[in-house]
Amino acid sequence: MKRIIGSVSAAVFVFAVLMLALKIDVFFYLENARSYARQSDVLYNIFGQLRNDIAAILYLKSDEYFHGGTEHPHGEEHTIADELSGEHKHHEDVPSQRQRGKEEDADIFLRLDRAIHAHRVQHLAPDQSAEIVPWFSLAVLVDPEYVQAYVVGGYWLGMRLNRPDEALLFLKKGLKSNPQAWQIYSQIGDIYFLAKKDYRKAAAYLERAYLAMDAPDVNKIDKKHVLIFLATAWERLEDYRKSVYYYEKLEALVPDPDVAKKIAGLNAQIKGISVYGQE
Amino acid sequence: MKAVFLIAANLMREIFRKKDFYVLLLLLLLLLVYLLNAAFFGIRDVFRYMKEIGLGLVFLFSLLISVPFAAKVMIDEAASKTIYALLAKPLSRFQVIIGKFLGSLFVAWCSFSFFFFLFVLASVYKQGVFTGILYFQVYVAGLCLLLVLTAMTLCLSVYCTFSTTITLAYMIYFLMSWFGGGLHESLYKIPLLGQAVYYALPHFEFFDLRHRLIHLWEPVPAWVMLALVAYACLYSGAMLLCARYGFNKRWL
Amino acid sequence: MSNEVLILKEVSVTYRGKAYSKDALRNLSLSVNRGEVFGFLGPNGAGKTTTIKSILNLLYPTQGSIFVFDSPSFHPRVRQRIGYMPEIAQYYWYLTPRELMMMYAGFFGIKKNDALRKIDGLCALVGLEKEAGVLMKNFSKGMMQKVSLAQALINDPELLILDEPTSGLDPVARMKVRDIIKDLKAKGTTVFFSSHELSEVELISDRIGILNAGRMVTVADMKDILSQKGHRQSLERYFLDIITKEENQ
């Protein structure tokens, strides 16, 4: 009897500690982040980096799951985020990393390894896509400052799994820990635009994304993406002046005859409205 | 032979009279129940993460029991001087090694079987599908893994202290599981020495069939399972011979 | 079949470490006759336990040979007829005395029912009837000593080797052990034991051997020692005389 009570107590205690430990740890981690402890505290830096590494491993799981459980090499032309965000049918049905190499060079150990671990790469079927979602949640649980996990997770929830409300909740939670993350604002804006068709809210978030995009590491493609959606959102809201404003910024960034035509068209509409307004 | 089984059977009494096994079993049960009920963003019909985490816990808890147990059987015997009364009986030292090995192995297998059974129940309940052959293959591979790990740990314990044995055993296991697959490219190209090291290292990555169960790949062919069992038996045999050599030379 | 149950011929044991080498036994020769009680004496560090370990093949003589029942001591089958009580009585905390002795009985090929009867008898003999089914994790030193003696007798040994058999026992228990040794002698069992309790050795031994610094200094009959003229001789006085002489040389 004593052994049973002792065992049950010990198991429940360890379980409770496990459940609480990460939450308490994350709380203090964010508190330290806000007080800029990372710059001076060695231990904080070490464990912070460990946290980042574990979160990265969990995030990479989503990529592994997306490719049916195989490791496969990513081309230089795109990142894992691109993999998870786009259609990459050309990767399907190719040998996985472990399958590569000549069969005649393989000794018995290598043949065994390939027979066990190698598998053709296969993307998850649409009805199985939800399988990758838990890993985003776990990655941000460990590292609440993992912006990419929020963004890609939000994309999958909002665009692929048709759960925009859950996506927005997830992304807004990410904003609490990362208030300057333009990527999260941008993704929220995309979801409001594409999934919810709420152009006013989309515009609000996309503007905040654009304002946060001052950093030099922000590339033109990302800015272009935000500007296109912003301009289109205002266009749909029939606020053509604001739409033109952002189209002009887009034209300045990446000159495009189609954009120039669009600006001209919108300006004409503005004048037309003005004429009608005067009348 | 009877003496060997007597030693093994009495050793098994230890694991069931200690709390560790029951604590881990209950902890696994609690964690599996938690995983079963977890819903991410309101999505309930996701199974793979639960299988991955569940299986990971099964293997982790089995390691937590089997490695320290195998590490301490010979060391404790010598440190507490119980070895004197044991070797004063009509037993050879090799019989003692085999008996301790079998006892440790049965402890590892029993623990693993209990944990795996719990996992299968949880997994089948969640998914509603029982892919029998895959479960069976993962289970057999797990038994083979524990066979090699127990033998290796016992061999190390004959030559090293308890803490060194545990550290080395875990290090070798985790390093080979994570990086063993890439060793062929690096080590194999170094003639003789590299190849010798490559073949001498215990390839624990061979026994990791979990991803096949998680992602519902097709089962491995029969020759692979036979090769795994053969490899496990041969490697364990080699480890036990090493242990015998070291133990025979030891002054007690 | 010779009358000598245990023969050590020119046995030397050298412990070698990284920076030292110690001769624990130096050309030790000794024989023990069938049915006698042989007391093996010596100061601390003389090599008594080393001698016993060599006989049981727990360590290997650097030189010399050891025969038990006319067979080399390293054969496991030789130990079929030996009972051994170690100096430090430690057994498995997760077993009861009954389970421990059942396991040991199994090693000797004793059948289950016979073993159970024997175990009950032995537990009664050493005073462990109530504790036979209790886990040994909470046993005191004295109780462990009793378990140790009982397990040494499980196979009705022809040669019983006892290393400090009365260490840690109260006077009543010590008397019990002496009585057990006397009974065994009456049955024809050869007893080879080491002890620091010279008064007890004096009471039960037929012959004694005194070891000092790895060398056998003397082997003598107990009757001869005690009947030396001109003294009210005791084993203790004899022992001290011998050792003092050795140290002065």
Image: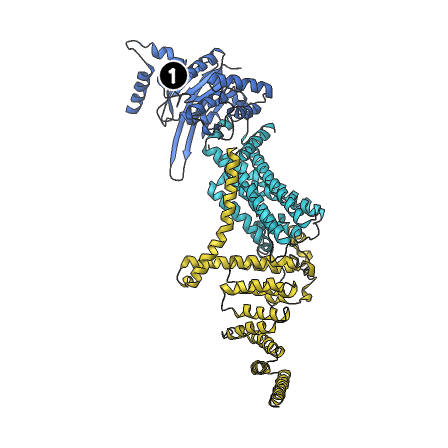
Where is C144 relative to A261, above or below?
Answer: above
Q: Nearer the viewer, residue A190 or C118?
A: A190
The colour scheme is by chain
A167 relative position to B250: left or right? right
The residue identified by callout 1 is C201
Q: Nearer the viewer, residue C23 or A274?
A: A274
* Drawing shade for chain A: yellow
**Res. B41 visible in picture:** yes
Examine the image and state in which quarter residue A190 appears: bottom right
C167 relative position to C57: left or right? left
Q: Chain of mark 1?
A: C
Q: Residues within 10 Å of mark 1 (few under 14, many from 20)?
A: many
Q: Position of residue C39 (x, y in %)?
A: 40, 18
Q: Position of residue B1 (x, y in %)?
A: 61, 29
> In what element is the residue under mark 1?
helix
Where is A173 relative to B77, above or below?
Answer: below
Toward the front, the furthest residue is A279
Examine the image and state in which quarter residue C228 appears: top left
* Drawing shade for chain B: cyan
C89 relative position to B173: left or right? left
Q: Amino acid at mark 1?
A: Val
The quarter of the picture where the C terminus of chain A appears is bottom right
Q: Position of residue B157 (x, y in %)?
A: 50, 40
**Res. C59 visible in picture:** no
Q: State the residue at coordinates (51%, 68%).
A: A181
* Drawing shade for chain C: blue
